[in-house]
Image: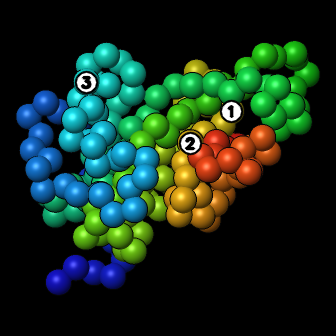
Amino acid sequence: MLPRVIKPQEMAVRVLKPSDDLSAFDCSREDSMGLNEFIHLEAMNYQKEKLGVTHLFTYNDQVVGFATLAMSEIETKEAPSLLSFRATIKDYPALLIGRLATHNDFRGRNVGRSICLWCLDVAKKLSEEIGCKLVIVMTEGKAVEFYGKVGFEIFTKYENKPRKWMYLRIP
């Protein structure tokens, strides 16, 4: 029997490899962003082309979720008062959570939240090593509420659109 909550320290994380068998992984429930299709058909190609790196999260050797990260930016005109700088800049450097999903059987067990917090930790390290001010994500539906609970905010320009760009300032 699975525990109600899976603690972050109970999960392992590693980069997706060509030899990984993801046939048992299913995140198709409420999947308006095409996450299930992405992990099964596109993730490895994204990685080969250096468009994003997919990290698999496992619990007892079973893949329970994944996150695909890439470097990105948001033009300051998208959110002119988001951050204040002494220097004039055109773009905010950002880490993009390109995809993040939890296996259907592990929803409601804190897996998605733990994966998201892991992504924020990666962003914090990047901010200290190469420069990164924000974490951004494009999402829709119930995922908007999920990211909001973690602390993400919607860019004002996208509040009334079905797909929303959201951001979180790196502390």
Real-space Cα separation, disc 3 to disc 2, in angstroms: 20 Å
**Nearer-the-camera pick, 133 or 41:** 41
Residue at x 64% of width, y 42% of height = 165
**73 left or right of 36 in image:** right
Of the residues shown, which amino acid type is indicated by label 3?
A: Asn
Measured along the vertical axis of the image, is residue 138 above or below residue 9? Answer: above
| Image quarter in which the N terminus is found | bottom left
| Image quarter in which the C terminus is found | top right
Q: Position of residue 68 (x, y in %)?
A: 39, 38
Measured along the vertical axis of the image, is residue 135 above or below residue 140? Answer: above
Q: Position of residue 35 (x, y in %)?
A: 35, 47
Q: Tell which tag, 1 or 3, sits nearer the viewer.
A: 3
Asked if residue 88 can be seen in this view, the reply is: yes
Of the residues shown, which amino acid type is indicated by label 1?
A: Lys
Q: Secondary structure at mark 1?
A: loop
Q: Secondary structure at mark 3?
A: helix
Q: Position of residue 152 (x, y in %)?
A: 66, 53
Quarter of image, res 82: top right
Of the residues shown, which amino acid type is indicated by label 2?
A: Met
Residue at x 59% of width, y 58% of height = 144
> In the rendered image, which residue does mark 2 sit on?
138
* Neighbourhood count class around disc 2 (C-alpha, 10 Å): few under 14, some 14–19, many 20 upward: some
Q: Tell which tag, 1 or 2, sits nearer the viewer.
A: 2
Sequence-earlier tag: 1 or 2: 1
Residue at x 27% of width, y 32% of height = 42
> In the rendered image, which residue does mark 1 sit on?
133
Query: CB atoms at circles 1 and 3 under 8 Å apart?
Result: no
Real-space Cα separation, disc 1 to disc 3, in angstroms: 28 Å
Q: Which mark is residue 47?
A: none
Sequence-earlier tag: 1 or 3: 3
> In the rendered image, which residue does mark 3 sit on?
45
